[in-house]
């Protein structure tokens, strides 16, 4: 029984979909780090400078007067919101590009299928070539089934 379970797991794990998903997760995690750096190191410093030399990562509200009081770190939250918007936009652009390519491929396949579709058929009575849409054979005048 354990052999069957291991064999099924191996088959599942080595399917193309699972491997593709694993690669996607790894690339996605790396992309997330790049976007995080873009927001924290490239976008937020100039934005903070424009708003009066504000460092967004240090923006917080203290929930007490003690030095070790809990804080609401809304600056870090703002950085994360901007990171999310950038990632969501990048994913949107990627999906849009994939859908555009997929639509072009489907149109090409439909054209190829339409071009490959037969334009003539054989009359079952006299074996003469006739148009596919014909309802009566022009040679033997037999009625044809559609």
Image (cartoon, rainbow, N blue to C red):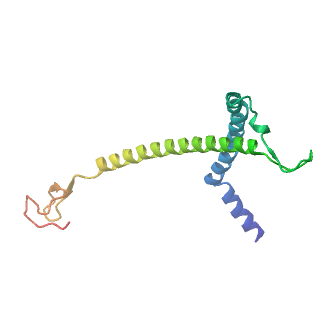
Instruction: Tell whether 116 sits left or right of 139.
Output: right
Residue lying at 50% horizontally and 44% vertically, measured from the top left: 96
Visible residue check, residue 83: yes
Measured as percent of width and height from the top left, residue 11 is found at 67, 59
| Residue 23 x, y percent position in the rendering | 67, 46
The quadrant of the picture occupied by the N terminus is bottom right
Q: Which quadrant would the C terminus be assigned to in this image?
A: bottom left
Image position of 74 (left or right of 116): right
Residue under the point 8% across and 58% down: 138
Number of numbered discs: 0
Residue 2: quarter of image: bottom right
* Name of the residue lying farthest toward the front: 65
Q: Nearer the viewer, residue 67 or 31?
A: 67
In the image, is residue 85 above or below residue 146? Answer: above
Of residues 21 and 132, the one drawn nearer to the viewer in this rendering: 21
Front residue of 131 and 68: 68
Residue 29 visible here: no
Q: Position of residue 81 (x, y in %)?
A: 67, 44
Image quadrant in which you'd find residue 45: top right
In this rendering, is residue 132 above or below 4? above
Q: Position of residue 51 (x, y in %)?
A: 68, 31
């Amino acid at each position: 029984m354990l052999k069957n379970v291991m064999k099924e797991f191996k088959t599942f794990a080595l399917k193309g979909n699972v491997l593709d998903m694993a690669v996607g997760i790894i690339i996605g995690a790396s992309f997330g780090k790049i976007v995080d750096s873009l927001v924290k190191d490239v976008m937020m410093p100039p934005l903070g400078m424009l708003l009066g030399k504000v460092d967004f990562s240090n923006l917080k509200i203290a929930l007490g007067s003690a030095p070790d009081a809990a804080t609401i770190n809304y600056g870090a939250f703002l950085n994360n919101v901007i990171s999310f918007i950038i990632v969501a936009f990048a994913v949107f652009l990627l999906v849009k590009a994939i859908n555009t390519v997929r639509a072009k491929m489907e149109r090409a396949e439909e054209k190829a299928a339409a071009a490959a579709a037969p334009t003539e058929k054989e009359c079952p009575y006299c074996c003469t070539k006739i148009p596919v849409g014909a309802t009566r054979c022009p040679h033997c005048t037999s009625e044809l089934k559609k």
